[in-house]
Image: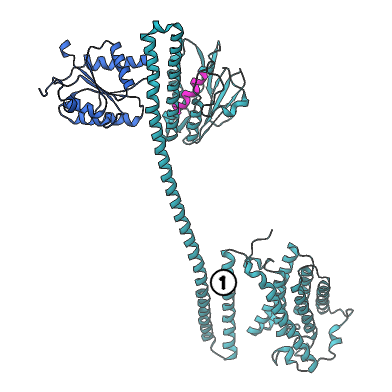
Chain colours: A cyan, B blue
Amino acid sequence: MLLALDSRLEPAGARTCAICAVLLGSMGTLALAGWLSGRLVLASGYPSLIPMAPLTALAFIVLALVFLRLRLKADRDLLAAAVGAFICALGCVRLMALVSATPALPDVEAMLVRDAGSFGGVPLARISPITAAGLALTGAAVVLLSMQRGRWRIDAAGWLSATVALTGCVVLLGYAYGTPLLYGGSVIPVALPSGFGLLLAGVATLGLAGPDARPIRVFCQHGARARLLRAFLPGTMATVLVAGAAVHLLVYGFKVNPALAAALAALAAAGLAAIVVWRNAGVVGLVIDRAEETLTRARDELETAVAVRTAELARINEELEAFASSVSHDLRAPLRHMTGFAELLERSCGEEVGPQGLNYTRQIVAAGGRMSRLIDDLLAFARTAQAPVRSEPVDLSTLVREVIADTSRDLHGRTIEWQLEALPVVSGDRALLRQALTNLIANAIKYTRTRDRARIHIGTPTAADDERVFYVRDNGVGFDMTYAGKLFGVFQRLHRDEQFEGTGIGLANVRRIIQRHGGRVWAEAALDRGATFFVSLPSRERTQPA
Amino acid sequence: MMADLRRILLAEDSANDIELTLAALNEHHLANQVDVARDGEQALDYLYRRGAHAERSAGNPAVVLLDLKMPKVDGLEVLRQVKSDPILKSIPVVMLTSSREEGDLLRSYQLGVNAYVVKPVAFGDFVDAVRQLGGFWAVVNEVPPDRTRG
């Protein structure tokens, strides 16, 4: 999985590779020319320094050509792979020869330049072990990059390249600080151009690996982290290195007092750091400012949208209230007149209309009453949607006993076996919960009407230790679970009015009340084998039942 | 006792409701004469004996049955004027309405209504309601002695 990269960096890799390859090739060619013409300064860069080995120069030229070739090819390149493997092998062979001094291996360098003499205590024209290692790693990176591109190959090439570039940097640093320990110590030292060449080779292969390769991927990604790294890391590192070099130059070059040199270097470093931070603060600040601006704009837009929506909701709510009021007033008046006159007809002209007519007037009155109940229930249902839900501790056990006392008034002589368990104290709106419980218990009473022994059980599930759940179970007529989905819808009924009267709003109201408390309600039943209604309420302020 | 039986003012715009109310009062054999105002303006004219009612005999009605929703001046406004008039405010006012809206009920009580009756749909219930309020306000209730005009 590739992370998003800053797209502006994609072509930069190939360009960097090309520049480094040209420089590397020129340097190798120059060094080789120096060896051929006897002007070793061309291979050393400075008269008193050790020159680059001719084998290194040759390897650099070959590598430069391979880099230029690979830059243009995106797919598999067997020739480049072969050359890379050769360079790698060469580096390894020289490294082993120098480390173990095995004479069995062919001495290529001796064949190139015979009797080159020596530089200090070190034989000239011999490759340094550090350079050999660098060449081996570069060759390996080239092999990896010439093969089919895959995640791990690119990453491995990236790490190898970074190591080579870092080695080059350390060598250059050693020269800058005049510390031979950093570029060879007591063994064959790395020439100054070789160190520079290693840096170029490392950077070139990094460019080939592309911005997606580890470890430089971190710098090339999108996002604030990569941007800040790109902005600050090079400048900061350069500042520290320049400060160190300045101390060295002042103390050893100009023979300045070390304390003064340190002070001057610190001053220079501080100035450089200030420039780096100053320049980048502008960029970073601009980015942050723009982000804040965008955020502010988005927030303003959101606030406006919310305000518009709130106004719209308030308007809709007003319309709803006006509608409810209209239903309450205007719809009820003609209904009252219809039933009123029908009853008047029955009372004052009963003899003239006859028994059939009386039957009709009674049906008119009954239908009017039913419509009136529907209007009442609908208005109550509309109000439960609007009424704010208060939050107070409600003891469900007490509430259930109150509701049973209320609903038992119109039992018409029936007896019901009540089984009441202790119920939890919940947090909610007492009036609304009372309405929901009334609907559930009235339903249980209604649908057990045909039973000789009606049993209603109100309790909490035994299996669950979740005491927010309670149920109302009856042994009534039940219902077919196929239609369970319709149970809680407005005007949805599972029984005909002649069987069990009702408006089809009660359970819709129960669901709305429980949902407004953040809970849920569901039912289990079987036809003719009773029904169980479960209610689950969220458990804030849970306490033991009183 | 019969001399004390004063009139009942019924302020109601719906002809159907007037007929039903009169039938209900009739059913109870209420002896009081019922005067009908068809809107709030007429009701106020009646109470203040002005306009079309300038010629009516003096004396406040025993009770005012007031419909909430009426043309021109609604029941709440009539109630407000009656209850803010030092002479009229002793008249018992019963709000007769088809509304169960809590807002209307609250406003009526804030304005000092004496009773608030939601007209039941079933005529029998309506008769009972009118009987109760008619009997209470027109017969049983003691109205302060008339200190008016005339």
Q: Nearer the viewer, residue A18 or A112?
A: A18
**Subunit ID for the residue under disc 1:** A
Q: Nearer the viewer, residue A21 or A272?
A: A21
Q: Quadrant of residue B54?
A: top left
Q: Residue at x 51, y 33 (%)?
A: A537
Q: Residue at x 86, y 83 (%)?
A: A107
Left or right: residue A445 compared with residue A189: left
Residue B112 location, x and y as percent? 24, 28
**B112 in relation to A181, above or below:** above
As drawn, the residue found furthest toward the left would be B150
Circle 1 residue: A231
Q: Main secondary structure of the magenta part?
A: helix
Q: Amino acid at mark 1?
A: Ala
The magenta-colored residue range is A433-445
The image quadrant where one finds the N terminus of chain A is bottom right
Badge 1: few (under 14), some or many (20 or more) residues near its Cα, within 10 Å?
A: some
Q: Residue at x 72, y 73 (%)?
A: A205
Left or right: residue A140 compared with residue A478: right
Q: Quadrant of residue A258?
A: bottom right
User: How many circles with numbers are drawn on the protein?
Assistant: 1
**B30 in relation to A332, above or below:** above
